[in-house]
Image: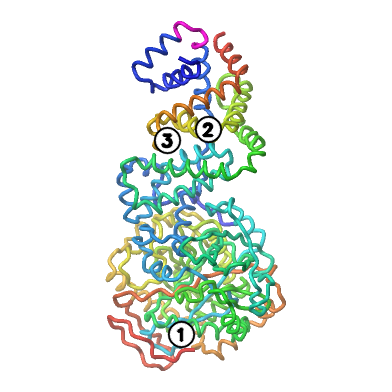
Amino acid sequence: MSHDKLAELINAYLDGEADAREREYVEREIARDETARAMLEDLRRVREMTATLPRQSAPDALAGDVLRLLERQALLGVVDEAPYVAQSSWRPIRAMLSIAAAMVILVTGGWWYMRPANLGGDHNDNKLAMVTTEKDASSVEKETSRPGDARSTRSRASRSLKRATEPADSAAPMTVGGSDKLAIERKDNPKLEESVARLVVKTHTEQRLAAGEKLDFLPTHAFENEPIRLRLALHDAAQAASAREAFKLQLASQGLVDADAMTVRTQATKLRGQSFYYQGKAGTNFQADNQSQMLVRIPVGQMKTLLNNISIEGVVDKDVALSAGPIVVQGLARAQSSVSYFGQTTPHTAKFDTDLGVSSSAHDTKKTITSDQASEAQVDIFAEMMKAVGLSEDMLSFNKSAPLENAQPTMPSPGKGRREVSGVAKNVGDDSLDAKTSTSGDRDEDDNSMAHRSTPLVERREAALEKSRVRRSPTVGRDAMADKVNPASKAAVTHGKGAEQQYITLVVEFVAPPKHSPPRTKPSASAKSSPAKPVDAQPKKSDHPQQ
Amino acid sequence: MVERPKEWNETAEAKPAQAGKLEDVDLIKGAKAGKSEAFGALIVKYQDRVYNAVWRISGNAEDARDLTQEAFLKALQRITSFREDSGFYTWIFRIAVNLALTARRSQKVRRTVELDETLDMASTQAVGLMQYAGNASDDQHLQKHLVEAMQSLDDDQRAVVVLRDIEDMDYQTISEILEVPVGTVKSRLHRGRMALREALGPMLRDKHRQEGD
């Protein structure tokens, strides 16, 4: 037997993988031959040393990152077949988003309002409220340099896209979001047309390019994994299209969007996306045909204005939810009420039905925003948002409760039950809150019960707001919206301070109406005259004029 | 910056202790049913082993993270096609090791800096090695050379050495993971260990003499 073969047998013998005949042979050889014995000992030592090499543990956030990546892929439509997504309780949202991959219109400013059709009061229906945030370049680079995407370190690429602000045949690169940089991953999907390369932006946008086109992105936001989402429950799926149109007008009235340019760009682009130019910043809705989702960007400094502008009298807060991954701030639909809610001067009582909710008590202006699996980036962005509306960062606390399963407005849905979170923020990470939440006994996985419980909440909130000294904003129409433009904010945008500003980016999602009836709501007492819509089992098409 | 609970980055869906208690079959069943907590538990259960193996094969921590992440992503994406005739452990390792080997092969340019990387890998382990008993400096030195030698191995040989000597897998499992015959596993392992033996040579024998004293 050759020396090499003997060595191979010795290795197998060492590992207990030699058969009887081989064992006998090796034992005979090592007994007879000192060289064989030495080889055995050397190999044994090599094996032992290798086995005792220090072990590295996986990065702490790996599991969470994988799950978030999977969700992002599902939102982007990258995963065609993902039972996790299809069967998860996110299905109502993802089903919509998977129809057309999640993409975005990058716009600054403009709040839109979406008024559920079955709400009473004077309302301009089909308006959507959007808020966006975006971090600065340094943090974005830091985040995008992390291997948050499995391919990020190996296949990252950036390309130049024709400037959205210039004629379609211009080859100048388009920039978005100031001097930030966005890691772009280029991915060739064989399912696409051969001439089309699909770029998967590292964060959450997707851009299809024609052959030869280049994409040069500056970062739109710095979300590590999940953008903040403003989810508005549609009581009528047909509201989405009109809402999008109204949104464009709202942005224009805000002085933040060049509506004409938007239109022109939209028509001129060769891409599937729509390009927008707004006060020195360009944006792109990469999936313009995705009627279920829009992205809006706004400087943090304009947050308060936007929150104010989102207010519509009589709007049920529960139909509007702001979430960043597992962080949900339910109910933002009030200008003054949001101020009063987040503000520290007007106490009121409110509870929100949500897995992760914001709550306050009549005598405590501290608010609790709980989250479970939000990334640090999400939390930071939320902190920025909260500060922008007067909520200090130390009011944030985190609930170590079960993960959010369905971060959408609290409309009755066939999803899992929600845990009502109530209580007062104490110290960050206060376990007592956790205990309070977990033992509140308010957990309910029955939709009817949830819907029923939501009614008193709304009524209480309405009553409390009535008593507040802060006047509600009137129903906001187009002109009214224009009047509410914050000159300072507008000036900040106009003067191109974006590079120094932090932006908030929200993906505004139109949450499909559930199959069963939304929660019973009552119009506010001070709502302007408008026929109150009876709540029935089937959502009706809105018959209110749309903007 | 808001202070966050220490366990913030743990998947809340399945803490390690809980993950260990659950059988793979139940977790796989749950994962196939689309339950995020089930897949989260699977990740938590195997992420350390997968990561460590991938790290040893790729020689780069950053790549290892990416590759491990990608491996679990692929596994979840394909979970419905997982036939369970081999364990999830074997399956995820197959995905991860293949990804690592593919990545290594595609990074031909990186081979020129492998030595630096291995040195980095060895140096980062230096502190960890200090906790080991015995002549710390000699062991540390030897381990460092071992790491360097491992990174100098042929990729296929290194993969087998990692799976056998670090992950303590038997030849059959390695064969399934690498999708090669057992004979090939034996051959690669033999060549890999012999190469390490040769690379460590005098140091190995010096240590042998020390232990014999």
Q: Earlier in the sequence, mark 2 or mark 3?
A: 2
Q: Main secondary structure of the magenta part?
A: helix
Residue extending furthest toward the front: A1
| Residue A382 vertical position relative to residue A524 in the rendered view, above or below | above
What amino acid is at disc 1? Ser
Could you tell me how far apart the alpha carbons at marks 2 and 3 are, in whole angstroms? Answer: 15 Å
What residue is disc 2 on? B158
Using the image, name the chain to which the residue with label 2 belongs. B
| Residue B127 vertical position relative to residue A417 in the rendered view, above or below | above
Label 2 with label 3: CB-CB less than 8 Å: no
Quadrant of the drawing holding the C terminus of chain B: top right
Q: Residue B173: percent from the left, percent from the top?
A: 38, 34
What residue is disc 1 on? A242
Q: Residues within 10 Å of mark 1 (few under 14, many from 20)?
A: some
Quadrant of the drawing holding the N terminus of chain B: bottom right
Frontmost residue, A127 versus A426: A127
Q: Residues within 10 Å of mark 2 (few under 14, many from 20)?
A: many
Magenta segment boundaries in residue numbering: A30-37
What amino acid is at disc 3? Val
Q: How many badges with numbers are in the image?
A: 3
Q: Label for residue B180? A: 3
Q: Secondary structure at mark 1?
A: helix
Q: Residues within 10 Å of mark 3 (few under 14, many from 20)?
A: few
